[in-house]
Amino acid sequence: MPRKKPWNKGRTVGQSRPLNPDQVDLIRLMFDQRANSKSTRDLALFNLALDSQLRGCDLVTLKVRDVSSPEHGVYEVVTLRQQKVSEGVTFHLSERTRASLERWIIASDKVGASWLFTGLTRGKDRAISVEQFRRLVKEWVSTAGLDPTHYTPHSLRRTQATHIYRETGNLRAAQLLLGHKNIQNTVRYLGIDKADALEIARKYHL
């Protein structure tokens, strides 16, 4: 009797890993060294994904007007409605992220109603798909020397919230940034366990 193909062959199983600060710096350096239209777009997408902590489905459907205006340039604070949960979420864009978005918008000659992230030749008037975004993330981490089987768009969504939680122990802040209704979802999403809780208690004794 032929053996059944494992259901998880070739798939990422379990939670996607967040990036650490050194890995984030390495990927940004990689974009800076290339200095072409693809790296300009990809750096803007990468930075926005980290700062916004949006799901892939929300990132790829952004329009220029969602993050900037001709009068004010790229916004420092952005509020959007999430597709999956129909809830609003507010996030802050760093100066680095705003600059990379500004460069991409100018270089690609986009206007307010344009899709923010599009193809570079064919499909340059269409938003990239979630699957294209997934392939880009795999490409970025592979080029940085990381195992792509452990990283997905959710890695970028988890990165900043995980970093903030580990640095501050503020789970409520992570919940708000991720746009979770239930804090238990944040606990599961960040992979928080009893050891994490005890480590935070050790640091923050009264």
Image: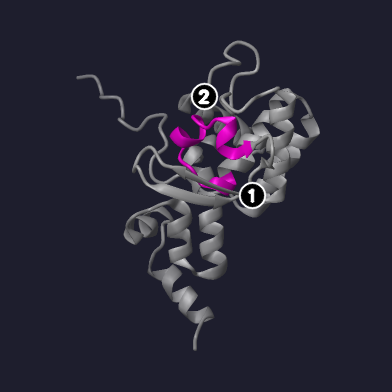
Residue in the picture at 68% in, 52% down: 22
**How far across and how far down the image is residue 36, in percent?**
77, 25
Residue type at tag 1: Glu
- For the record, the magenta segment spans 50-68
Residue in the picture at 69% in, 25% down: 38
Give the SS element for disc 2: helix
Colour convention: one colour
Q: Is residue 23 on the magenta stretch?
A: no
Residue in the picture at 31% in, 30% down: 6
- Can residue 40 be spotted in the picture? no
Residue for badge 2: 132
Left or right: residue 79 compared with residue 76: left
Q: Nearer the viewer, mark 2 or mark 1?
A: 1
Q: Is residue 63 above or below residue 150?
A: above
Residue for badge 1: 76
**How far across and how far down the image is residue 125, in percent?**
58, 16
State the separation of the CA atoms marked 2 and 1. 27 Å
